[in-house]
Amino acid sequence: MNHPIDNLLEQAKKLNADERAALIDALHDLNAPPDPEWEAAWIRECEDRLAALDRGECRPRGRRGLACIIE
């Protein structure tokens, strides 16, 4: 890598997990600015999945339950 990137990486290693996550989000937004329509659609999808889970129409899948299996 080049010198400035090496320096940035060393600084990033000193951040806590929340700070690193915020940095990753900020860097991502530099390359791919947020799309409000996509974000709104994803929020609706998440709300729909949570509602289906609450109604017992699906069950958590995976170690963290991030996905839903429709029964």
Image (cartoon, rainbow, N blue to C red):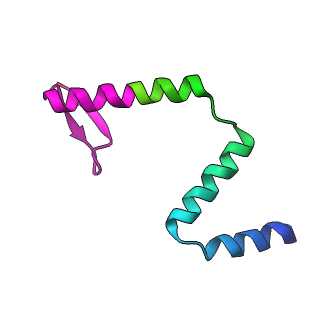
Q: Is 33 on the left-hand or right-hand side of 70?
A: right
Residue 61 in which image quadrant: top left
* Quadrant position of the N terminus in the picture: bottom right
Above or below, 53 relative to 22: above
Q: Residue at x 43, y 30 (%)?
A: 43
Where does residue 4 sit, x and y in percent of width and height? 85, 69
Above or below, 31 relative to 68: below
Above or below, 5 relative to 46: below
Q: Residue at x 86, y 72 (%)?
A: 3
* Quadrant position of the C terminus in the picture: top left
Where does residue 49 sit, x and y in percent of width and height? 30, 29
* Residue situated in front as seen by the camera: 63 or 27: 27
Where does residue 54 sit, x and y in percent of width and height? 17, 32
Where does residue 21 sit, x and y in percent of width and height? 55, 58
Q: Is 35 on the left-hand or right-hand side of 62?
A: right
Q: Is 8 on the left-hand or right-hand side of 63?
A: right
* Residue situated in front as seen by the camera: 23 or 3: 23
Residue 14 in which image quadrant: bottom right
Q: Residue at x 15, y 27 (%)?
A: 55
Q: How many numbered discs, if any?
A: 0
Q: In the rendered structure, does residue 69 fall within the stretch colored magenta?
A: yes
* Residue positioned most to the left: 56
Residues in magenta? 45-70
* Residue positioned most to the right: 3
Q: Residue at x 31, y 25 (%)?
A: 48
Q: In the rendered structure, does residue 3 fall within the stretch colored magenta?
A: no
